[in-house]
Amino acid sequence: MGTFHQDRHPLHGITVVVATSGGDGAPEVYVGRCDDIDAERVILLDADAHRDGDGGHSNDEWVRRAAEYGVWPRHPRVVLPRARVASVQPLGEVSATTPSS
């Protein structure tokens, strides 16, 4: 369970996977610790990002690897507009051996 703060989203403190449309419309995923989610934005701390196909890996493959080994926190803070966010899911709900949905 995440850290309980009355003024934060219930996922605050939990490592999540955020699927987006990407800035140019290309699918992109982020894995990071949820700081807050509101009507306008999703804020992640200590996050990494992957664009579908980078390094020869699909987003699903990258997320499964992140579920198994974690990610290198390349971005101390990421702010994503809600309009770009397709889904937010706790990383712990992703199986490292089966495709994510």
Image: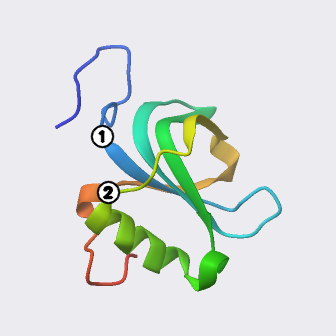
Amino acid under label 2? Leu
Q: Which residue is mark 1?
A: 14
Direction from residue 99 to residue 58 in the image, left or right: right
When the figure is inspected, residue 25 is found, relative to residue 23, above or below; the finding is below
Quadrant (top left, top right, bottom left, bottom right) of the N terminus: top left
- Residue 67 marker: none
When the figure is inspected, residue 66 is found, relative to residue 58, above or below; the finding is above
Q: Position of residue 40 (x, y in %)?
A: 63, 32
- Secondary-structure class at tag 1: loop
Residue at image point 37% right, 64% down: 66
The colour scheme of the drawn protein is: rainbow
Outermost residue on the left side: it is 1
Instruction: Assess whether mark 1 and mark 2 are in contact (beta carbons under 8 angstroms).
Output: yes
Q: Which residue is mark 2?
A: 91
When the figure is inspected, residue 20 is found, relative to residue 46, above or below; the finding is below
Disc 2 from disc 1: Cα separation: 8 Å
When the figure is inspected, residue 98 is found, relative to residue 18, above or below; the finding is below
- Secondary-structure class at tag 2: helix
Amino acid under label 1? Ile
Direction from residue 71 to residue 18 in the image, left or right: right
Q: Position of residue 9 (x, y in %)?
A: 37, 29
